[in-house]
Image (cartoon, rainbow, N blue to C red):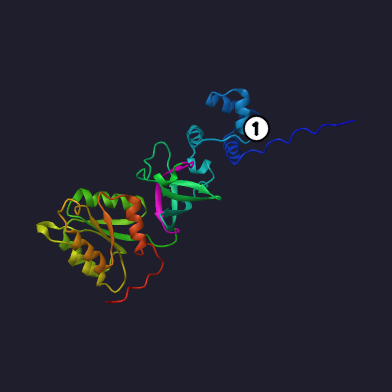
Amino acid sequence: MNSQQPPEEESPSQAAQLVRALLERNGIPKHRQASFVGEFFNLSRAAAHQRVTKGSAWTVDEFQALASRFGEPLAQVLGAVSPGESGAKAVLRVGALQIGCRIWFARDTDNAYAESLVAIESAGSYVVVPTAAAAGHESLRIARLEIGEGTAAVPRVAVFDDERDVANAVCTMLRAAGVDAVAYYAADDLLADIPQEMFDGYVIDWLLPNNATAVPLLAAVRSLPKHSALVLLSGKTRSGSADPVEVGAAVGNFKVQLVEKPVQPPVLLSALANDGLGATERAAPPQA
């Protein structure tokens, strides 16, 4: 007598397991989970059963809807962080640069991190990339990002631009990334504070009032005994207001990272990290 073996049931996907765990901890028993999902998402009985018992895919929007229904953070539902944990470990990847960081995922009520960075899951961990680089991948919005592994001191950066709105906007970008940013609007004020060595990095605009340039500020930073990350902002080389030859000479002489305005957060963070911001140890460059 031939006895036909029943087909092996498809094991639940990781997404289905997370949904089931969410429902269980919120008092929805196993025998009610499929019907709850069907009612919540207006699915047929068969489709709802498939969602919670087998390998059907779940979207981030669907996870967010369930998280909001039960008042849980999306990151907790996705298993990225447990209640009370301070963020999820991740790697910020911009081009060839990779920086250890910690991230907090955004809810519907949160503003995403400047909408310019997202997280994608890779081999059980998270990689943070510019939004454009995540095309074709399921991604998660980020509400907050901190550079480093969470044990190092928060880096402190001075931001100089005589246009207050620009300086404040750059500070806002850096603070969203976990950097303690301080705005300066007058070159003399920053020049007086540089010898105090209060900062781990500097973001300095090239053009000063009365056609002056940032050369004295760059020279003061590079004269410090301890190396500091140094980024030069310039947005007027193409318009002719800033001489590209002078800018190029300053970049070479002072070994600075050049970032064009308007400033994009991933580019600015990458430039600061390339010059040592967040590094545990950085030797001062040899004197010329």
Residue, disc 1: 30
Q: Nearer the viewer, residue 8 or 132?
A: 132
Furthest-bottom residue in this view: 287
Image quadrant where one finds the C terminus: bottom left
Residue in the picture at 21% in, 61% down: 247
Closer-to-camera residue (238/91): 238
Residue 147 or residue 238, whichever sits in front: 238
Q: Which residues are magenta?
A: 136-149
**Residue 223 belongs to magenta span:** no
Horizontal side of 264 relative to 46 (left or right) equals left
**Mark 1 packing: few (<14 Cα in 10 Å), some, or many (20+)?**
some
195 left or right, relative to 65:
left
The number of numbered discs placed on residues in the rendered structure image is 1
Q: Is residue 118 depicted above or below 196 in this figure?
A: above
Magenta highlight on residue 146: yes
Q: Position of residue 46 (x, y in %)?
A: 63, 25
Percent from the top left, x then y, of residue 173?
A: 31, 50
Residue that extends furthest to the left in the rendered view of this protein: 210
Tell me the amino acid under the disc marked 1: Lys
Q: Is residue 191 visible?
A: no
Which residue is found at the position 44% from the left and 45% from the top?
A: 134
Q: Is residue 22 above or below residue 87?
A: above
- Residue plotted at (47% across, 41% down): 136
Which image quadrant is residue 3 in? Answer: top right
Q: Secondary structure at mark 1?
A: helix
Q: Is residue 39 left or right of residue 119?
A: right
Residue 62 is situated, as x and y percent measured from the top left of the image, at 50, 33
Where the N terminus falls, by quadrant?
top right
